[in-house]
């Protein structure tokens, strides 16, 4: 069964600190993995998309890593800002139409 | 380029009523997917439309239906509303669905009383 597990469920950090969010998935076959940022009550916004052959991808202060062999991904946020407070969702794509499996997300709170 | 738009943004209905939500995708995008998001749950896939045809369907009851028009705009209908249908309904557009990047709209917050 295709599953996605994200950890931690929630995280509180101080502004300026770094943090790393984890994602384990069992989607097979595997085509690519996406990380989304979702502000409360809004639609998700794409941060990165990585294919199975990519190990690292950056988007500003966000860096995603992927290990397709162990089916693990992480999202590292550097020098956090108050605006980083949101849910971060890991979404592996299984290569068939409509087969996007959404994790429940990690809720990040950045405090001043 | 304008983003994905959804109307209305907020909706309050009572049990037993029906509701229609609308989604206008990014110009040139032919795939529209619909998702339901409830507190504490990940996005649940409802269905995907491509070129006016439903291409994929999630595990939701038949009360949930949709359609897509020739201009790629899509509507989602929920009949005989239940309290559990209260959720944020999101639509996402992409060039052709599948592995293409999806762009989400702001969502419609539906409350069923």
Image: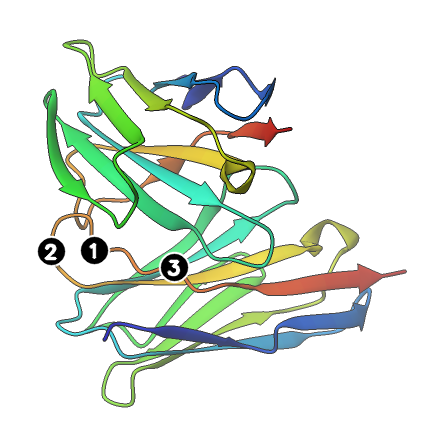
Q: Position of residue A59 (x, y in %)?
A: 48, 56
Residue wearing tag 1: A99
- Callout 1 touching callout 2 (CB < 8 Å): yes
Crowd tier of the residue under label 3, counting other residues whose Cα lies within 10 Å: few below 14, some 14–19, many 20 or above: many
Q: CA distance from mark 1 to mark 2?
A: 6 Å
Report whether B14 appears left or right of A14.
left
Image quadrant containing the C terminus of chain B? top right
Which residue appears at 51% of the width and 30% of the height? B107
Question: Coloured how?
Answer: rainbow
Q: Position of residue B2 (x, y in %)?
A: 41, 17
Q: CA distance from mark 2 to mark 3?
A: 15 Å
Q: Quadrant of residue A87?
A: bottom right
Local secondary structure at mark 2? loop
Local secondary structure at mark 3? loop
Q: Is residue B26 visible in this depiction of the protein? A: no
Q: Indicate which disc residue B74 carries.
A: none
In which chain is the residue bearing label 2? A
């Amino acid at each position: 069964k295709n599953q996605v597990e994200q950890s931690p469920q929630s995280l509180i950090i101080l502004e300026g600190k770094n943090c790393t969010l984890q994602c384990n998935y069992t989607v097979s076959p595997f085509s690519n993995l996406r990380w989304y940022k979702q502000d409360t009550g809004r639609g998700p916004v794409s941060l990165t998309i990585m294919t199975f052959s990519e190990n690292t991808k950056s988007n500003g202060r966000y860096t995603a890593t992927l290990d397709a062999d162990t089916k693990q991904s992480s999202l590292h946020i550097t020098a956090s800002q108050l605006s980083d407070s949101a849910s971060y969702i890991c979404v592996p794509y299984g290569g068939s139409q409509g087969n996007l499996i959404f994790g429940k997300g990690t809720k990040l709170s950045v405090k001043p | 380029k304008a983003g994905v738009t959804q109307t209305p943004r907020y909706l309050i209905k009572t049990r037993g009523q029906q509701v229609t939500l609308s989604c206008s995708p990014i110009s040139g995008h032919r795939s529209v997917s619909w998702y339901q998001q409830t507190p504490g749950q990940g996005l649940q896939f409802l269905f995907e439309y491509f070129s006016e045809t439903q291409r994929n369907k999630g595990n939701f009851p038949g009360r949930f239906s949709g359609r897509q028009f020739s201009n790629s705009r899509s509507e989602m209908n929920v009949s005989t509303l239940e309290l559990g249908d209260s959720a944020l309904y999101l639509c996402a557009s992409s060039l052709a669905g599948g592995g293409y990047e999806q762009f989400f709209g702001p969502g419609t917050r539906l409350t069923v009383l």
